Image: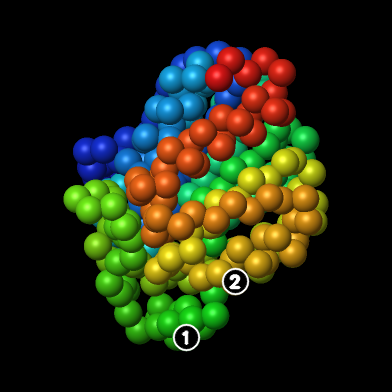
């Protein structure tokens, strides 16, 4: 039996015990919890219980990700969510990029159990040719250059794979239509942050979210690229998240 790949320093799961309000924090595709740690720690500093799982295939080596798919990533999100529900009175879910995709799916399937959702540049679709060609490309190539560290702020680097595993990318693309089709099932409050300059997720995703969840609120980020949780607008995202929690959780301390 092959030994599991070691977890990269900084990619470990995050578990910050706090008060009765739980917050599930989900990282993006090929990324790690490193991109979410400032957000998680800000929420924990407000007195909340915060958990950020390391999704299967992430935070080790890119080849491991090709052995997983969106059902594996979502299963880990549900596991962490149920753990938080057992520890907390109410639970919110927040996510970056694919993490946003997964927490939207959680809100679709778990209904009122999700007290609220905040997403940053959630991925829900693509019009790019390279994405449309994934069914063919994933059979011919194992990977292509990575998508990490799309950050405007100088000197800041995201801990992410330097290659994009194509079989895993194909799996993610097949999740998008399923999530989009069920967006109307979301009853939780939804706050969506979208970077005006995003070199990873296209504006199409923002349009699909607002069309599918009419009660969702979109706020534009003008000074960040894709990984806004590590960029100039991060404080805006963090404070907006706390405001949504205060509005929808009577027990919120922050």
Q: Position of residue 195 (x, y in %)?
A: 48, 59
197 w.r.t. 112: above or below: below
Q: Position of residue 128 (x, y in %)?
A: 49, 81
Quarter of the figure with residue 90: top right
Label 1 sits on a secondary structure element that is: helix
Residue 2 shows in the view: no
Task: Choose between 111 and 203: the one closer to the eye.
Answer: 203
Judged left or right of residue 34, residue 201 is right
Judged left or right of residue 77, residue 57 is left
249 w.r.t. 164: above or below: above
Quarter of the figure with residue 78: top right
Which residue, given by chain and number where applicable, does mark 1 sit on?
Answer: 129
Give the residue displayed 59% in from the left and 43% down from the top.
118
Determine crowd level at label 2: few under 14, some 14-19, many 20+ residues with C-alpha closer than 10 A. Answer: few
Which residue, given by chain and number where applicable, does mark 2 sit on?
Answer: 204
Cα–Cα span, label 1 and label 2: 14 Å
Task: Choose between 129 and 239: the one closer to the eye.
Answer: 239
Q: Which badge, 1 or 2, comes first in the chain's sequence?
A: 1
Color theme of the render: rainbow
Give the residue displayed 51% in from the left and 33% down from the top.
239
Quarter of the figure with residue 34: top left
């Amino acid at each position: 039996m092959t030994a599991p790949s070691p977890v990269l320093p900084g990619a470990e799961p995050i578990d910050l015990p706090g008060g009765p309000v739980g917050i599930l924090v989900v990282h993006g595709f090929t990324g790690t919890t490193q991109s979410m740690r400032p957000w998680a720690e800000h929420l924990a500093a407000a007195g909340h219980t915060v958990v950020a799982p390391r999704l299967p295939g992430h935070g080790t080596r890119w080849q491991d990700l090709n052995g997983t798919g969106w059902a594996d990533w979502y299963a880990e999100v549900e596991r962490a969510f149920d753990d938080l529900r057992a520890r907390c009175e109410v639970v919110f879910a927040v996510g970056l990029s694919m993490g946003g995709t997964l927490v939207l799916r959680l809100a679709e399937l778990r209904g009122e159990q999700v007290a609220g959702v905040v997403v940053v540049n959630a991925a829900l679709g693509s019009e790019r040719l390279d994405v449309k060609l994934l069914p063919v490309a994933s059979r011919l190539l194992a990977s292509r250059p990575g998508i990490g560290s799309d950050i405007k702020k100088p000197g800041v680097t995201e801990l992410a794979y330097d290659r994009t595993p194509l079989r895993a990318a194909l799996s993610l693309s097949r999740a998008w239509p399923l999530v989009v089709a069920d967006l109307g099932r979301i009853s939780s409050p939804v706050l969506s942050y979208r970077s005006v300059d995003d070199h990873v997720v296209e504006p199409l995703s923002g349009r699909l979210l607002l069309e599918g969840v009419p009660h969702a609120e979109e706020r534009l980020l003008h000074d960040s690229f894709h990984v806004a949780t590590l960029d100039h607008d991060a404080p805006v995202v963090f404070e907006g998240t706390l405001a949504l929690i205060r509005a929808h959780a009577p027990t919120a301390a922050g």
